[in-house]
Image (cartoon, rainbow, N blue to C red):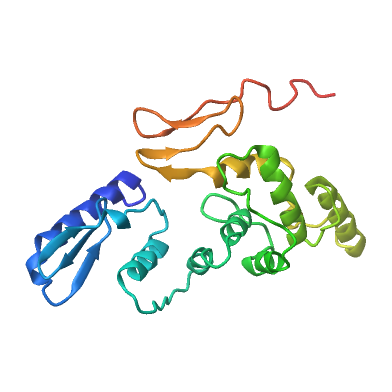
Amino acid sequence: MLTVTRYKMQLIDLICEDMASHKDDFTQHKLVLTGRDPVEINSGVIIKCQDMKTTEEEADTMIVQQVAEVKTKKVLVVADDTDIFVLLLHFCCQDLLAAHGLTGCDTVATYFGIGKAVALRVLRAGVHALSDIGDTIRVLSEFTSQATPFILACYGQPKCTSLTEARQKMWASKVGRSVAGAPKLASLPPQMRHSRKMWPALTFRWQSGGMHCNQIHREWIQHLDGHGKMAPKCFSQQLFPVTSP
């Protein structure tokens, strides 16, 4: 049941309402409820905290941010989830979230054999800027111009000009070293069309009233229909030839 978002939101609302109804029990401690409408319960008094309202979709990082907001001392985070570490470090390195998204997150598939340590090493080299990744005003060509060199560097192919060239080069290298047969396709860089699929996935933003994104293609716009579901308007052009050459 909790895999359905609206059911999960209803459960959160019920828990927050129940805890707020016991406000008189919180006389010695401060309690912050970050449900649909954030409130602070202090000395039996409920105070609305609209300044703490957020569109952050990661509950773990949202908890840390709000604890830091209401507490002046240092906040110690103990977690075994790499995503939490990466998302929180965004405040120290603005390109870190983009690198995290490019190398695998909730909406983008990860690359075989390319972990966060590899992405961090490429990022620390300071050669590849990722300022356009996730920016809703950027077009596909601008996204690709930054994402492609970064991905190539993660695969150790910084001199290649395209993912196709890197795939061919790595294929030839692996075949030449192995006598057992062809290498696994998963070990090669993604295809060029991967950027087209990855671009809208990294550009979606939560806004008031639901999930929206700017026009991500001249003839492809994602929007919310009357039932609160994503309804794509698909390409009118053909994505592949009707007949083989």
The residue at 65%/67% (across/down) is 120
Q: Left or right of 86: which side holds 138?
A: right
The residue at 28%/49% (across/down) is 9
Closer-to-camera residue (50/230):
50
Q: Is residue 202 above or below residue 140?
A: below
Q: Quadrant of the C terminus?
A: top right
Location of residue 148 with respect to 78 vertically, above or below: above
Q: Is residue 124 left or right of residue 21?
A: right
Query: Residue 194, can we see it?
Result: no
Measured from the top left, where is residue 16 in percent x and y?
20, 57
- Extreme left residue here? 24
Residue under the point 50% across and 43% down: 204
The answer to whether residue 35 is seen in the rendering is yes
Kindly indicate the quadrant of the structure image that contains residue 39.
Answer: bottom left
- Quadrant in the picture for residue 111: bottom right
Q: Position of residue 158 (x, y in %)?
A: 82, 58
Q: Residue at x 30, y 56 (%)?
A: 51
Q: Tell me residue 228's x, y (percent).
A: 36, 34
Asked which quadrant contains residue 19, the reply is: bottom left
Looking at the picture, how far across and down is residue 122, in whole percent? 71, 65
Q: How many marks?
A: 0
Please tell me which residue lies in front, 75 or 15: 75
